Amino acid sequence: MQALRFEKTGSFDNLQLRNIDKPSLTAGEALVRVRAAGVNGSDAAAIQGVLPFVTTPRTSGRDFSGEVVEALDDTGAPLQEWVGADVWGTGSERGFTSDGTFAEFVKVPVTALSRKPKTLSHTEAASMTLPWLCAWITVDTLANVKQGDNVLIIGARGGIGSAAAQLCKARGAKIFGTYTSLAKSTPPPYVTPIELSSDNAIREAIAKEGLQNKIDVLLDCAGYERPFNDALFTMTPAGTGRVVVMAVHAKDGMFPINLRAFYTKALTLKGMKSSMLGPLEIRAFLDDLAAKIDQGIYEGPKAVKTVDMRDMDGVYSALKEILTRSSHIRSVIVP
């Protein structure tokens, strides 16, 4: 089969189209024909060597949507109930320490299989699994957003930020979201937008709403120091404020924080690691997400860009776009 692999990290040029053996199955595994694989920032970071735990050689990619072509039960006998099923998946260590989804086929534990939403195409489904998983971990596991919380999302237009906004809305929170520019953005009606027009834009907007010192949860989905430190001044000083970070723009990972604002508000800081949940937890989340998308509770992507796996210039461009956040339309690789 064909796959996009890197033998060493350090540059996107290390990612090359290779002919490799199709994965062989052991008991309890399924073989999925990949119809689309989402491109994520962690894919780009892994190839560039930013993530120290990535092992090589490695097939890249974490998200997928496709159909099951073979499955084995725990005894190694054929499992026909899954054959032909349209499934989607993401997360765990796939693409980091085990081979990923930028390939014609990928093997998945049968216990991790999740049927994709019936109302989404493979390209749509593959574009949203990891961003929504990250948003779920952020909103549910780490921030524990509750009804009545005032939530501020830095980077509300991105894949994770927009998903987090939908999840917070479902929980009954009041949501504020930052946007680099509102000239070409149409925020959803349940998000109060804040345009980052100055270094103090966030605290000024929150004060105008009468909520200075009343923000309960800060979700930083972008990783830039100025809006982050601006947002700290809006947080509650009651000792219940929760801050979750999941990105840093600087290549060296350094991020200056106003610690005086942080400790005088008695805030709690947590980091979101997208591989922190196991396969069974991820399956449970995806099953629930698929059902709610089909019910119309959550919205899928409005647009997706497809890139042929054999178009290396297109692949490199998609990786650069996700790393630099130069496009708000997510790309998927199509084998």
Image: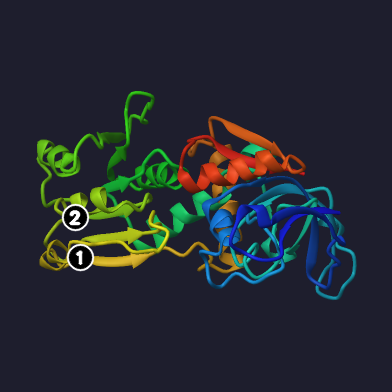
**Quick check: 271 above or below 129?**
below
Write down the quadrant of residue 81 in the picture. bottom right
Colour basis: rainbow
SS assignment at label 2: helix
> Can the viewer see residue 252?
yes
Asked if labels 2 and 1 touch by Cβ distance under 8 angstroms, the answer is yes
In the depicted view, which residue is nearer to us: 266 or 238? 266
Q: How crowded is mark 1: few (under 14 residues within 10 Å), some or many (20 or more)?
A: many
Tell which residue pokes out farthest to the right in this image: 77
Residue hosting label 2 = 232
- Residue at the location (53% across, 41% down)? 321
Disc on res. 241: none
Residue 104: x, y in percent?
80, 50
- Residue at the location (62% across, 66% down)? 96
- Residue at the location (47% across, 55% down)? 134
Residue 108: x, y in percent?
73, 62
Residue 143: x, y in percent?
33, 60
**Quick check: 67 above or below 278?**
above
SS assignment at label 1: loop
Disc on res. 267: 1
Report how far apart the C-alphas of labels 1 and 2 lie in the structure: 9 Å
What type is the residue that disc 2 sits on?
Leu
* Left or right relative to 240: residue 210: left
Q: How crowded is mark 2: few (under 14 residues within 10 Å), some or many (20 or more)?
A: many
Which of discs 1 and 2 lies nearer the camera? The answer is 2
**Quick check: 187 above or below 234?**
above
- Residue at the location (48% across, 36% down)? 328
> Can the viewer see residue 149?
no
Of pointers 1 and 2, the one earlier in the residue sequence: 2
In the depicted view, which residue is nearer to us: 268 or 86? 268
In the depicted view, which residue is nearer to us: 49 or 303? 49
